[in-house]
Amino acid sequence: MSDSNQDRFNASLVKWIENYYGPVSEVAGCESPIEQMMFLALSTTASLYGETLQINTQYRIDDYRADFYVRSWEVCSKCKATFERSVIVECDGHDFHERTKEQASRDKKRDRIFQQKGYTVFRFTGSDIWKDVFECAGEVTNFLREQIEALSIDHWISHHQEASAE
Ligand SMILES: [Zn+2]
């Protein structure tokens, strides 16, 4: 898509979000159009694949707030055990040139703190989101899907292998 087509596409996407979810500032606690687009793209991508996705905005971890806490899970069809994985998604401002060194340093520190606490962090620049928000959201949902599939296979092998081999 050319830049101007992309801009028009994104503008109509933001408009669509506003029509659907209400005024910008009230869309599920999103603080900017970039975040709204991410919220919508995550929900849409998940529902396309029939995945359960819980998306919390402005998620508090200690003294910090993550833009998104995204959790996905699956329930074992045999024993009802639940496998889940969650990630943090951070959206930088639309124009990264506006970000100061201090801001960048603060963001890196947040990433380190979240990672120390065991969270996987996906940080996207505003221009990446603006360029193709569905690709960004796809990275997140693909990761979650792969992780949960792996957990599910491990679980099946360790809990139900013998039963199914009979
Ligand atoms: Zn099971």
Image: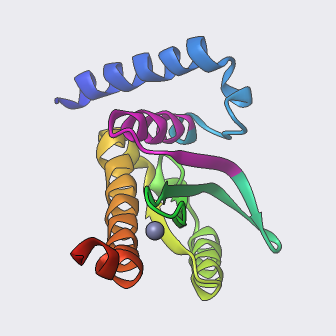
Q: Residue at x 32, y 21 (%)?
A: 9
In this rendering, does residue 37 appear at all? Answer: yes
> Which of 54 and 153 lies nearest the eye of the viewer?
153
In percent of width and height, residue 25 lies at: 72, 29
In percent of width and height, residue 137 lies at: 38, 48
Q: Residue at x 69, y 35 (%)?
A: 28
Could you tell whether 148 is left or right of 61 in the image? left
**Extreme residue in the bottom direction:** 116
In percent of width and height, residue 87 lies at: 53, 65
Image quarter (top left, top right, bottom left or bottom right) of the C terminus: bottom left
**Total residue callouts:** 0
Q: Which residues are magenta?
A: 36-57
In this rendering, does residue 128 appear at all? Answer: no
Residue 55 lies in the magenta stretch: yes
Quadrant of res 50 = top left
Q: Residue at x 50, y 70 (%)?
A: 121
Could you tell whether 146 is left or right of 113 in the image? left
In percent of width and height, residue 153 lies at: 32, 73
Q: Is residue 158 above or below residue 23?
A: below
**Extreme residue in the front direction:** 166
Q: Is residue 79 above or below residue 109?
A: above
**Extreme residue in the top direction:** 19
Q: Is residue 81 above or below residue 37?
A: below
Image quarter (top left, top right, bottom left or bottom right) of the N terminus: top left
**Extreme residue in the right direction:** 63
> Which of 101 and 17 lies nearest the eye of the viewer?
17
Q: Is residue 142 above or below residue 28?
A: below
Quadrant of res 148 = bottom left
